[in-house]
Image (tube, helix red, strand yellow):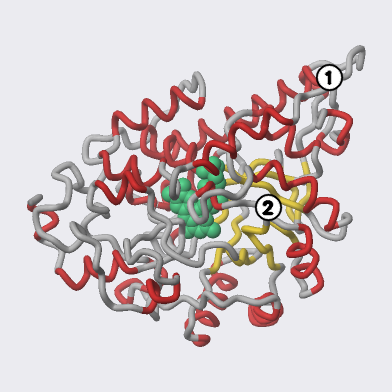
Amino acid sequence: MNKKHEAVPNGARRSLFQMAGAGLLVSAAGGAAAQAVVDTPRVDTPGVDTPGAVAASSGPQAAAMPVDKKLAIISPAHLQEQARKVMTPGAYAFITGATGDEWTLQENRRAFNDFPIRTHRLQGMAAKDVDLSIELLGHKLAYPIMVAPMGVHLFAHPQGEVATVAGAAAAGALYQSSGASYQPLEAIAKAGTGPKWFQLYFNADVGVTRSLLERAKAAGYTAIIITADALGPGASDAFKLLGMPFPPGLTFGNHDPLQGGTGNFRHQKVALTPDDIGFVKSVSGLPVIVKGLMRGVDADAAIRAGASAIQVSNHGGRQIDGVPGAISVLPEVVKAVKGRVPVIFDSGIRRGIDVLRALSLGAQAVAVGRPVLYGLALGGPSGVQSVMEQLRDELQLAMLLAGAGSVRQLDGSFVKA
Ligand SMILES: Cc1cc2nc3c(=O)[nH]c(=O)nc-3n(C[C@H](O)[C@H](O)[C@H](O)COP(=O)(O)O)c2cc1C
C-alpha cells in the first residue's frame, strides 16, 4: 500500500468516500437510493477501505507537475491526452469519467453535430469587429464562457481551487466555485479577482446551509448556484476499478473546522423542491441560478419559484447515464424560459463552435468543466488561463467565419436543426 495512504487516518478516508454529489462521489453502495449513500456511515465498496487495494499510483497529484505555465493548445483531444500523461491514473479516471456506460458523456459531444452551422457571407466584418461581450446578472463579461463548478481540484494541482480561480481571473472569465471544493470558499474568493458565483450543496442541517450562504455573500460571491441534479454518487467504472483513490489528506474546505468551516458535507439534502430556491434567495439576498435542469417544465417551475437564471446541464454525464446530450434539450428549455431569465449551458463544450451553437440555440453563456482541470494539471493558473483564452479566441474566429458580429446577433438562423 502506498505509504501516503497509510498516513491518512481510516476515519478520514472513510468520510471522504461517503460524500455524495459533485459528480464526485462514490460508494458502490449500489442501487440503494442516493439518500442511503449520503446518510449511511458505511462503505461497502470492496477495495475502498481495504488496505492494499488502492492503486499504487494514487498518491497526491502534481508533485512533479509544472506549477504555472502557459499552454499551446492544439485540440481538446491533445489537451486531454497531455493531461493524462501528468496525472495519476486515479485522478485522470475521476476527472475524465462519467457514470454507467458513458453514453450520455458521448452524446454530450455527438449531439452538437445535430446542429450544423449556417454561415452568413458578405457581412463586411473583420476579426476586430467581433464583439463577444455580454451582461449577465449584473456583470459585464468580456466573453460568454465561464468555469463550471467542479469539486476537488486537488486531484489536478496541489494548490487546488486557488490556482484555478487565479487562472480564470487572469483570463477574464467568471468562476463558478464548487461547494465541494478542497479549499474553503474564502480562500478561493481571495485568490480570484474576477466575478465569482458560489455553488451550494444544500446541507440537511439548515444552520449549515445558512452559514454557507452567509459566508459566500460575505466573501464576495455575487450569485448562488443550486445544483439540482447531483443527488447521489457519480463515480465512473474506471475510478471504481482503481479502488476510488482520492488524494490523501483531502478535506472539503467549506466544512473543515480547521479552516473555519462547519457541518458535514455528506449530510446533504437531496429532496430539493422549488421552495428551496426562495429560501436560498431570501437568506443570501443574491440571485439564484438553478443548475442541472434538462426539461422545459422544470425550468418554468424554477423561474416561478424565483430563479434568476437556469443552467442547462447533465453534469457532464456524471450523474445519470442515458439522458440526452445537454445540447439536445437546450431548445426545449429556452422555449419554456421565454426570455424571462438568462439560460446558461454546460456539458460537452470543447470548441469555440460549440459555444457558437449553444448561443445560437438561445443560451446567453456557457460553462466549461473538464478541459479547465486538464489545463490546471498541465500548467496551473496559467494553464487554466490558456484553456479559457483558447475557447475565447476560437469563439471569436467562429463568429467571424459564421458572419456574426456580436453574440446578441446569434440566433436560430445560425444553426440547422
Ligand atoms: C471532476 C468534476 C467535478 C465536478 N463537481 C461538480 C460540483 O461539485 N458541483 C457541480 O454542480 N457540478 C460538478 N461537476 C459538473 C460540472 O459543473 C459540469 O456540469 C460538467 O463538468 C460540464 O461538462 P464538461 O466537463 O463536459 O464541460 C463536476 C464535473 C467534474 C468533471
Question: Where 210 falls versus 179 (above or below)?
Answer: below
Local SS, label 2: strand
Left or right: residue 87 compared with residue 201: left
User: Measuring 46% from the left and 56% from the top, which residue is drawn there?
Assistant: 23
Give the percent coordinates (x, y) of residue 76: 50, 27
Residue identifier under label 2? 312
Residue nearer the viewer, 106 or 199: 106
Q: Quadrant of residue 262?
A: bottom left
Q: Judge whether 211 appears above or below 181 on screen.
A: below
Is the C-beta of the residue carrying label 1 under 8 Å from the nearest atom of ligand 1? no
Relative vertical location of residue 126 with respect to residue 174 in this rendering, above or below? above
Marks 2 & 1, CB-CB < 8 Å contact: no
Q: Amino acid at mark 2?
A: Val
* 34 in relation to 188, above or below: below
Distance of label 2 from label 1 (alpha carbons): 25 Å
Q: Looking at the picture, which amino acid does disc 1 mark? A: Thr
Is 209 on the left or on the right of 250, as rendered?
A: right
**Residue at x 38%, y 49% (from the top left corner):** 236
Q: Left or right: where does residue 290 sit relative to residue 235?
A: right
Check disc 1 and report the residue beneath it: 119
The C terminus lies in which quarter of the figure? top right
Task: From the top left corner, tell me how far across and down residue 110 is, in percent.
Answer: 61, 31
Task: Check disc 1 and report its element: helix, strand or loop.
Answer: loop
Residue 121 pos. (x, y %): 89, 14
Tell me residue 230's x, y (percent). Answer: 52, 63
